[in-house]
Image (spheres, helix red, strand yellow):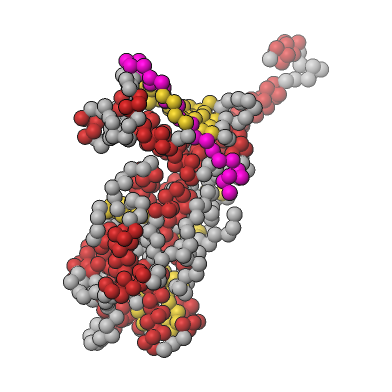
C-alpha cells in the first residue's frame, strides 16, 4: 500500500499507552504497541474520534502555519461558517473577517458563499439528472473515506460536486486575478479549518487531482490573534464588504443545514460516525429509496461538533443559528443565472471517481482468504472474548486478525500468556519434584515415576 | 454466530450460521452486516457483497415475519456463495404468486411497521443467480439462493 498522509498524529511524549482510543476508532485503525498508540495509516479516515476520547490530549492535528503565507504575494483566508460560531454571540461577521487583514492576509473569501452555490447546483442536478436515490453529500471527507473502506458500493451515489472549500478557493483566486490583476500563481489561498479530515483532504484530494487550496491552517493557530484584532478594531468603522454570504450558506455549519438549504424533495440529515455507519448499512440494502438527498457528517452536531472546536457544540450551534437568522434575508451575492452558468460549464464538478479502498482484505486470492478466515475463526475462538484491549488491539477479533497478518502473536493476549506461564510453571514444578535415583529413597522414586 | 469450516472437494469453504426467532426484527440486519464484514475481508467485489447482503436481509426478514423459527446458513466457496434459510411456519401456498412484486400476505401489524411490502422474494431473485424455494403449507419453507462470484480475471 502506498503512503497515506494524515493530519492526525501522536504527541509521543503525551501518550501513556492507555487503550481509550483503540476502542473508539470506527475503522479499527489504532494499536497500542510499546506503550504508545500507533495509527495504521491506510485505515485512518481522520474522523477525529480518537482526539475526542484521548484523556491526555496526545492526539494532535498537524497543519500548515502562518509562515507559509510568505511564499505568496497575495494571500486570501478561507474561513467557513463554523469559524464564526467560535466567537461570542452577536459578534459581527464583518469584524471577524476584517480581523484576518491584520494577520497578514490581503483578502478573505467566505466558504459559505460556495456552499450556497453547491446547494443551487445540487438542486439543479437532482431535478435535471434524476440520479439514483438517495444522492449522498460529498461534503464530509471523513464520511467519503469511510465509504471507500466500508461502503464501496455506495460511492457511485456520491454527489458529483467539488467541496465548497475547493470551489471557494477557485472563485477567490479568479476574483483576485480579475480585480487586482495579480498572476494566478502568486495568489495563496489558505483554508482556516477546524476539521482534521479536511486537512488530509487538501493534501490528498478526493474527486479532483490538485487542490486549489495552498495551505490549511488549524483554527486554533489564529484564534487568539483574531480575538486581539477584534478588540483593536472594535471602534474603527470598516467597510471592506468582506461579508457577502447569506444565512443559507452559513447554515451548513451544523447538521440539517445542508439538507435544508437544498430546499428540494425529501431529505435526511444524519450525524455521528456510528449513526452514519448504521444508516449506510440500510442504504446498502436498498432501503430509503424515497429519500432524495442525504446529508452525512462524521461529527455529532455537524461541523460545529468538530473535535477541534473551541466552543461547546451546543453553544456553537446556538451562535451559528443566530447568525443564520440574521443573514437569512440578505440578497445572495451570486445570482441564479451565474450559478447556472457554473453548472453548465461543468466548472465545479469532480473530475475523478471515488475509488474503493479494500484495506480490510485478508488476501487477494479468495481461496487463500478463505483459509486465513478459517484460521482467524479458530484463533478468535481460543481468545477470552473480553475485548479488554490489553494486547493493544481494540478487540479479540482484531488481535486474531493481526496475528493472521503476522503483526501480532497469540501471547500478546495476557490471558493466553497466563495460560502458557501456568503450563510452564506446572512443568517446572513437576521437574523440581523429580530426584535423581542415586539421591532419593525408594518411596520418593516411586512417586516420581508414578506421575 | 456459529461457524463451521469444512473441507469439501479439497476446496476451502466457510459456513456461517445464525438462529432466527419469530418477530426478532433485528436479526436480519445484524446477520447481513456481520456476513458483509466477513465477505469484505475475503475480498469479494463490492457488487457481490451488496447483493449477498440484500439476499440475506430479505430472506431472514421473511422467516422473521412469516415463520415461528428458522436458521440461516451462508456457505462460501471461491466460486459461489449460497444463502440458505430453513424455517418452521405456515409455508407458502402459491410460490409463483409470492414471487410477484407487491404481493404480500403480511399482517396489517407488520405492514404498519414498514415491512411486508411484497418486495422480498422479487428482490432476492433480482440479487441472486439461482433461486430455489421448497415449501409445504403448515410445515415450513426452505429457500436457497446462489450468487456466483467472478473469477480473478473477470474482476479486472
Please report the residue visible at 58 percent of the width from the left and 59 percent of the height from the top.
Answer: A3
Looking at the image, how many numbered discs can be counted on the residues?
0
Looking at the figure, which quarter contains the N terminus of chain A? Answer: bottom right
Which residue of the protein is positioned furthest toward the bottom in this rendering?
Answer: A181
Please report the residue visible at 71 percent of the width from the left and 24 percent of the height from the top.
Answer: A431
Q: A256 left or right of B140?
A: left
Which residue of the protein is positioned furthest toward the right in this rendering?
Answer: A438
Q: Does A265 appear above or below A323?
A: above
Please report the residue visible at 29 percent of the width from the left and 53 percent of the height from the top.
Answer: A292
- Nearer the observer, B23 or A240: B23
Looking at the figure, which quarter contains the C terminus of chain A? Answer: top right
- Residue A403 visible in this rendered orientation of the protein: no
Residue A440 part of the magenta-drawn span: no
Q: Quadrant of residue A166?
A: bottom left
Please report the residue visible at 37 percent of the width from the left and 30 percent of the height from the top.
Answer: B60
Q: Does A44 appear above or below A75?
A: above
Q: Residue A319 appears at what percent x and percent y?
A: 23, 66
Q: A44 left or right of A222?
A: right
Q: Which stretch did the figure color magenta? A: B134-156
Q: Quadrant of residue B51?
A: top left
Q: Quadrant of residue A232?
A: bottom left
- Nearer the observer, A51 or A295: A295
Q: Residue A255 appears at what percent x and percent y?
A: 28, 57
- Nearer the observer, A271 or B38: B38
Q: Residue A164 appears at what percent x and percent y?
A: 36, 67
- Residue A265 visible in this rendered orientation of the protein: yes
Q: Does A175 appear above or below A125?
A: below
Amino acid at each position: 500500500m502506498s503512503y497515506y498522509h494524515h493530519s492526525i498524529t501522536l504527541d509521543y511524549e503525551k501518550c501513556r499507552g492507555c487503550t481509550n482510543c483503540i476502542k473508539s476508532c470506527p475503522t479499527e485503525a489504532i494499536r497500542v504497541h510499546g506503550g504508545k498508540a500507533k495509527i495504521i495509516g491506510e485505515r485512518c479516515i481522520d474522523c477525529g474520534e480518537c482526539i475526542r476520547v484521548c484523556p491526555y490530549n496526545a492526539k494532535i492535528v498537524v497543519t500548515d502555519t502562518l509562515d507559509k503565507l510568505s511564499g505568496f504575494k497575495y494571500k486570501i483566508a478561507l474561513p467557513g461558517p463554523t469559524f464564526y460560531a467560535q466567537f461570542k454571540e452577536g459578534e459581527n461577521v464583518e469584524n471577524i473577517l476584517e480581523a484576518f487583514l491584520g494577520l497578514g492576509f490581503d483578502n478573505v473569501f467566505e466558504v459559505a458563499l460556495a456552499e450556497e452555490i453547491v446547494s443551487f447546483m445540487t438542486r439543479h442536478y437532482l431535478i435535471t439528472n434524476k440520479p439514483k436515490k438517495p444522492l449522498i453529500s460529498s461534503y464530509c471527507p471523513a464520511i467519503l473515506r469511510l465509504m471507500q473502506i466500508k461502503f464501496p458500493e455506495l460511492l457511485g451515489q456520491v454527489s458529483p460536486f467539488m467541496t465548497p472549500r475547493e470551489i471557494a478557493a477557485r472563485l477567490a483566486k479568479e476574483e483576485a486575478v480579475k480585480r487586482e490583476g495579480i498572476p494566478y500563481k502568486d495568489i495563496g489561498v489558505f483554508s482556516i479549518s477546524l476539521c482534521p479530515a479536511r486537512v488530509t483532504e487538501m493534501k490528498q484530494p478526493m474527486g479532483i487531482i490538485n487542490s486549489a487550496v495552498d495551505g490549511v491552517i488549524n483554527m486554533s493557530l489564529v484564534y487568539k490573534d483574531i480575538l486581539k484584532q477584534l478588540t483593536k478594531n472594535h471602534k474603527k468603522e470598516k467597510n471592506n464588504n468582506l461579508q457577502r454570504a447569506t444565512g443559507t450558506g452559513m447554515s451548513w455549519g451544523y447538521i440539517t443545514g445542508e439538507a435544508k438549504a437544498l430546499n428540494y424533495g425529501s431529505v435526511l440529515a444524519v450525524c455521528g460516525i456510528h449513526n452514519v455507519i448504521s444508516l449506510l448499512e440500510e442504504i446498502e440494502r436498498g432501503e430509503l429509496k424515497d429519500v432524495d438527498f442525504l446529508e452525512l457528517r462524521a461529527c455529532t452536531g455537524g461541523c460545529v461538533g468538530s473535535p477541534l472546536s473551541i466552543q461547546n457544540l451546543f453553544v456553537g450551534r446556538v451562535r451559528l443559528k443566530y447568525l443564520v437568522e440574521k443573514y437569512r434575508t440578505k440578497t445572495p451575492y451570486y445570482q441564479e443565472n451565474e450559478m447556472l452558468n457554473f453548472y453548465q460549464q461543468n466548472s465545479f464538478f469532480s473530475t475523478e471517481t471515488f475509488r474503493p479502498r479494500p484495506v480490510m482484505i485478508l488476501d487477494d486470492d479468495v481461496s487463500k482468504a478463505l483459509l486465513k478466515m478459517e484460521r482467524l475463526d479458530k484463533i478468535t475462538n481460543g481468545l477470552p472474548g473480553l475485548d479488554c484491549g490489553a494486547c493493544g488491539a481494540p478487540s479479540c477479533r482484531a488481535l486474531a486478525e493481526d496475528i493472521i497478518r503476522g503483526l501480532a502473536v497469540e501471547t500478546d493476549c495476557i490471558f493466553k500468556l497466563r495460560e502458557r506461564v501456568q503450563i510452564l510453571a506446572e512443568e517446572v514444578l513437576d521437574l523440581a519434584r523429580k530426584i535423581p535415583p542415586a539421591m532419593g529413597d525408594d518411596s520418593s522414586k516411586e512417586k516420581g515415576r508414578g506421575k | 454466530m456459529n461457524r463451521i469450516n469444512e473441507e469439501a472437494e479439497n476446496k476451502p469453504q466457510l459456513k456461517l450460521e445464525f438462529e432466527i426467532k419469530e418477530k426478532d426484527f433485528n436479526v436480519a440486519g445484524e446477520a447481513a452486516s456481520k456476513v458483509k464484514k466477513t465477505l469484505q475481508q475475503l475480498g469479494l467485489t463490492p457488487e457481490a457483497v451488496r447483493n449477498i447482503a440484500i439476499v440475506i436481509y430479505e430472506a431472514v426478514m421473511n422467516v422473521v415475519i412469516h415463520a415461528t423459527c428458522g436458521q440461516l446458513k451462508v456457505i462460501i466457496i471461491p466460486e459461489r456463495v449460497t444463502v440458505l434459510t430453513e424455517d418452521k411456519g405456515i409455508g407458502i401456498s402459491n410460490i409463483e404468486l409470492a414471487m410477484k412484486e407487491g404481493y404480500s400476505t403480511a399482517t396489517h401489524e407488520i405492514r404498519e411497521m414498514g415491512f411486508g411490502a411484497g418486495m422480498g422474494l422479487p428482490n432476492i431473485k433480482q440479487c441472486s443467480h439461482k433461486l430455489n424455494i421448497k415449501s409445504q403449507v403448515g410445515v415450513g419453507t426452505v429457500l436457497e439462493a446462489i450468487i456466483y462470484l467472478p473469477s480473478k480475471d473477470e474482476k479486472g
